Image (cartoon, coloured by chain):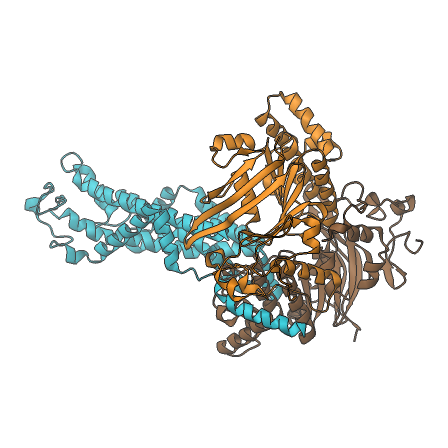
Chain colours: A orange, B brown, C cyan
């Protein structure tokens, strides 16, 4: 019995473009222990969504996995043909997205969509599928499940649609649920409910990989966090450790930004500059251009992930030394 | 001369919806904004905050009620009388991708208000003024002739802000200006907005669903639910001692970036979000409120003063 | 203190990051991308250029005259002297083809351009103004579209008489409604976009919004419509001439050539086949080019 639901090692994704090859995922290694909620945090363009897509095998053309492996419960899935991959999706790995409106078929009733998901992966009759769907709706706390079963997506609120998505993703009891910005498009009161729901799913035995740019969401539900920047993992630690002792200048910059906002300082802390264009990454550390502590070494070489304390790894030459900030 | 720059009196906006229904986007809202003030407007989707923002800059005509600018009612003004006021009130949009014409250069985008209001003589003068504006918002001059799609979200937002201040308005409605941005960029834009407000003597209506952002910028904050004001008052007072149940739920629901705050029992709203096409009678929040009584269904609560904060709740003041 | 340092870092970072802003995508890049993705479109582009050149330089490319009759050698098969044979008047078919290209290409391009302008202007006004203006313009367009275009063209040519200017007029009036409809629907969509709302809030006049915001954003569609309307015009003219309603002899146009060649289809098939092939080639080339442009321009707008 493998205690790691997902194991990603040295994953690299390359996308050829007009102006050269872009690597939105560059030598990424992470794991989702069984029964945990693991988070990937980062801003737009850092590669977190692409990592998820690479794991599920849904990379947009012409992207390709050019290196590394992905293991689901010990089983290697990177090289599998599309046919096998399709069998896995929905039954072993499920994914929910930011915009449920665009992921649900607008012209099919939601109940039927979930039924379809069931019957794709398991042998059962229409009645049995409907039964399972209704049970799942109740489990994800969709009120008036029988009525809602016959609704179209546009007739439901954002929160309900997201619950339908979760129901569809969970109905075959996948081992791994990947949630890509699941609450970003939702109101804050609905967000709170959905996060509680995700917590319950974990308790029920599904491992969750949650992707978000919202530090609050990550803090609330994750056990372990990976921080990504420009396609690489720059820091990883257990949640309490990361939030109390962030080591990478980028992570610290993020926390400073968020905290200065919460504390209402006179001028807000920022990370100067913008996220780099993946086509024109600086030589050396990708964060060097924006880093207040950038040294000569940082401009020439890319640091490796080094362990600063058990379970806490940082990709920076300056860790171990006291930060100036 | 009125002491308020912008005033709303019993503003109501209703939209026709499919099936002979009406969407009550804004219902009977009255508020005042002083010159130099930043009023924060918070609420979730469907509360009417975007609609209210647009009503206040007279780009949307209310179904009933009045909007006053510098004491003058503008709602039923003739177009020719209103024309000079048009440039006094501007809007910064939420979506930095959709609010800039993809086929115009940065120079032309920011120049448009200047050219429309003929604020400069020659083309050269206009370009110079655009350069000044871009400098003020932190966009390098070299990109004067680039197109929007070549910039990041934060930079586009800066361009949008430059455009909004180009004709020297006095009142700007910021409609979720940082919601689409990453947190590190968001702070840059917030700093910019604060700085511009001070240097250009602006008045803001700052609309957001993000409570921490509003707390940073706003002097007073107004909480809306389904077209009505729940609570309005000085920012700190509302955040420290929220009196309306909805405000309390809103503040509680925000996920705190601190794992130590986990496990705290968060009260969740009961029931379903009501639709603006079919609002509950009396207090519109009552179907989700754990404290609702019969009076809440029968009688719509009016805004009452409780310790310097206006609250629309029958139970307020009785805690 | 911290603020100054913050500002310094910010400025330094901004300077270093200036290179991060995307490069200007020049027209050349667009063409290169089309070259890579859609070779047929590029080939078509060059075919059209070649044809245009051949048409323009017609007198230089052939020793024969357009109407040089030579009754001794009428209806002769393709040979070394007459690469495509001669017609019933002994005129060199290839020469007639080249001169006819001028007429046919002109007939393709000019009405397509005119109907584009007319249709775009009316379409944007109808879409933006709405109300009665919209209703009136669209009803006229609907009526125009309700008639089969050939029938409409025939009726008009019959009423106006022959001659190239009348052909231009007819083809323009037959094709504008299609453009208007497409532009109108684009206008309706653009009218609700945020940047148009922004222009309204700035105080930009309605006319200026139509001119500077809506029409330029219809440009990709218009370009494609243009390239696709050209073959439509050529075909319609060819049919008109075939029926004797368009270009009058002794001027050459491909349609006319097909018409006159009809009588000799058994003993001199090249008379009709040559212009027929020329029309087919032209129409295909414009169609492929139009499709190629569609592919290149549309996803670019959405890719961001």
The residue lying toward the viewer, choosing from C117 and C212, is: C212
Quarter of the rendering containing residue B84:
bottom right
Q: Position of residue C86 (x, y in %)?
A: 12, 45
Q: Position of residue B118 (x, y in %)?
A: 56, 75
Quadrant, the N terminus of chain C:
bottom right
Residue B75 visible in the displayed image: no
Residue C203 position (above or below residue C160) = below
The residue lying toward the viewer, choosing from C165 and A89, is: A89
Q: Is residue A79 left or right of residue C48?
A: right
Q: Position of residue C95 (x, y in %)?
A: 16, 51
Image point (69%, 54%), residue name: A243
Q: Which residue is outermost to the right? A: B318
The residue lying toward the viewer, choosing from C236 and A256, is: A256
Q: Position of residue A155 (x, y in %)?
A: 68, 39
How many discs appear?
0
Residue A293 visible in the displayed image: yes
Image point (55%, 68%), residue name: C13
Residue A28 position (above or below residue B218) = above
Q: Is residue B3 left or right of residue A156?
A: right
């Amino acid at each position: 019995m493998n205690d790691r639901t997902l194991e990603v090692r040295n994953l690299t994704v390359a996308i050829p473009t007009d102006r050269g090859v872009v690597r939105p995922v560059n030598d990424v290694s992470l794991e989702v222990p069984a029964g945990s909620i693991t988070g990937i945090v980062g801003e737009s363009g850092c590669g977190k969504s692409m990592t998820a897509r690479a794991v599920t095998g849904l990379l947009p053309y012409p992207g390709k996995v050019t290196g590394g492996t992905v293991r689901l419960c010990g089983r290697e899935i990177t090289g599998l043909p599309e046919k096998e991959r399709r069998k896995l999706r929905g039954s072993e790995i499920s994914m929910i997205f930011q915009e449920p409106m665009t992921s649900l078929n607008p012209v099919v009733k939601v109940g039927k969509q979930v039924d379809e998901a069931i019957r794709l992966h398991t042998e059962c009759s229409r009645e049995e599928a409907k039964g399972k769907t209704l049970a799942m709706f109740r489990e994800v706390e969709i009120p008036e499940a029988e009525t809602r079963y016959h609704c179209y997506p546009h007739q439901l609120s954002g929160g309900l649609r997201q619950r339908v998505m979760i129901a569809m993703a969970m109905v075959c009891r996948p081992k791994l649920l990947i949630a890509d910005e699941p609450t970003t498009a939702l109101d804050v009161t609905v967000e709170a409910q959905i996060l509680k729901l995700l917590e319950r799913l974990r308790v029920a035995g599904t491992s969750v990989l949650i992707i978000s740019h919202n530090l609050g969401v990550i803090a609330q539900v994750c056990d372990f966090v990976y921080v990504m920047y420009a396609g690489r993992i720059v820091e990883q630690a257990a949640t309490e450790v990361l939030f109390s002792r962030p080591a990478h200048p980028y992570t610290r910059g993020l926390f400073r930004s968020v905290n200065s906002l919460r504390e209402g300082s006179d001028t807000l802390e920022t990370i100067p500059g913008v996220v780099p264009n993946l086509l024109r990454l600086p030589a050396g550390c990708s964060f060097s251009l924006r880093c207040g502590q950038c040294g000569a070494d940082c401009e020439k070489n890319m640091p490796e992930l080094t362990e600063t304390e058990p379970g806490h790894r940082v990709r920076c030459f300056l860790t171990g030394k006291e930060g100036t900030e | 001369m009125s002491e308020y720059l912008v005033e709303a009196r019993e503003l109501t906006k209703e939209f026709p919806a499919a099936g002979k229904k009406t969407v009550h986007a804004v219902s009977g809202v009255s508020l005042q904004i002083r010159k130099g003030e930043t009023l924060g407007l918070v609420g979730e989707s469907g509360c009417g905050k975007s609609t209210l923002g647009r009503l206040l800059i007279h780009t949307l005509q209310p179904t009933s009620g009045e909007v006053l600018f510098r004491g003058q009612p503008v709602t039923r003004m003739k177009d020719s009388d209103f024309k000079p006021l048009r440039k006094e009130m501007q809007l910064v949009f939420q979506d930095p991708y959709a609010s800039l014409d993809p086929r115009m250069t940065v120079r032309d985008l920011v120049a448009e208000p200047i050219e429309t209001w003929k604020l400069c003589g020659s083309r050269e003068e206009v370009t110079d003024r655009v350069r000044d504006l871009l400098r003020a918002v932190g966009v390098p001059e070299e990109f004067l002739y680039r197109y929007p799609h070549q910039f990041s979200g934060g930079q586009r937002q800066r361009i949008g802000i430059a455009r909004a201040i180009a004709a020297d308005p006095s009142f700007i409605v910021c409609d979720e200006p940082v919601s689409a941005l990453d947190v590190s960029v968001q702070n840059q834009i917030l700093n910019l907005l604060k700085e511009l407000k001070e240097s250009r003597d602006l008045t803001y209506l700052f609309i957001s669903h993000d409570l921490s952002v509003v707390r940073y910028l706003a002097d007073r904050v107004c909480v809306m639910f389904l077209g009505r004001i729940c609570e309005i008052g000085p920012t700190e007072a509302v955040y420290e001692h929220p009196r309306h149940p909805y405000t309390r739920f809103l503040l509680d629901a925000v996920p705190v970036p601190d794992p130590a705050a986990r496990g705290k029992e968060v009260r969740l709203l009961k029931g379903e979000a009501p639709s603006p096409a079919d609002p509950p009678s009396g207090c519109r929040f009552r179907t989700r409120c754990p404290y609702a009584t019969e009076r809440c269904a029968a009688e719509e609560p009016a805004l009452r003063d409780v310790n310097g904060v206006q609250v629309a709740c029958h139970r307020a003041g009785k805690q | 203190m911290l603020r100054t340092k913050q500002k310094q870092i910010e400025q330094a970072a901004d300077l270093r990051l200036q290179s991060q802003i995307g490069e200007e995508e020049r027209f050349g890049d667009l063409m290169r991308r089309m070259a890579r993705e859609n070779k047929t479109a590029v080939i078509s582009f060059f075919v059209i250029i070649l044809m245009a050149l051949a048409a323009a330089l017609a007198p230089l490319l052939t020793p024969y005259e357009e109407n040089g009759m030579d009754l001794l050698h009428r209806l002769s098969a393709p040979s070394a002297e007459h690469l495509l044979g001669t017609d019933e008047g002994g005129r060199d078919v290839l020469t007639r083809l080249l001169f006819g290209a001028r007429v046919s290409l002109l007939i393709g391009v000019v009405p397509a351009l005119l109907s584009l302008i007319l249709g775009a202007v009316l379409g944007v006004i109808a879409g933006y103004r709405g109300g009665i203006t919209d209703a009136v313009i669209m009803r006229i367009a609907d009526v125009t579209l309700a008639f089969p275009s050939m029938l409409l063209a025939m009726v008009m040519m019959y009423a106006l008489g022959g001659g190239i200017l009348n052909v231009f007029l007819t083809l323009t009036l037959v094709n504008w409604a299609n453009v208007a409809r497409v532009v109108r629907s684009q206008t309706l969509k653009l009218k609700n976009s945020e940047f148009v709302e922004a222009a309204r809030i700035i105080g930009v006049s309605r006319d200026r919004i139509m001119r500077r915001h809506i029409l330029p954003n219809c440009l990709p569609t218009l370009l494609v419509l243009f390239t696709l309307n050209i073959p439509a015009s050529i075909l319609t003219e060819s049919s008109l001439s075939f029926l004797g309603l368009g270009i009058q002899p002794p001027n050459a146009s491909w349609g006319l050539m097909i018409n006159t060649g009809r009588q000799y289809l058994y003993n001199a098939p090249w008379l009709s086949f040559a212009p027929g092939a020329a029309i087919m080639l032209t129409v295909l080339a414009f169609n492929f080019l139009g499709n190629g442009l569609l592919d290149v321009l549309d996803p670019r707008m959405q890719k961001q």
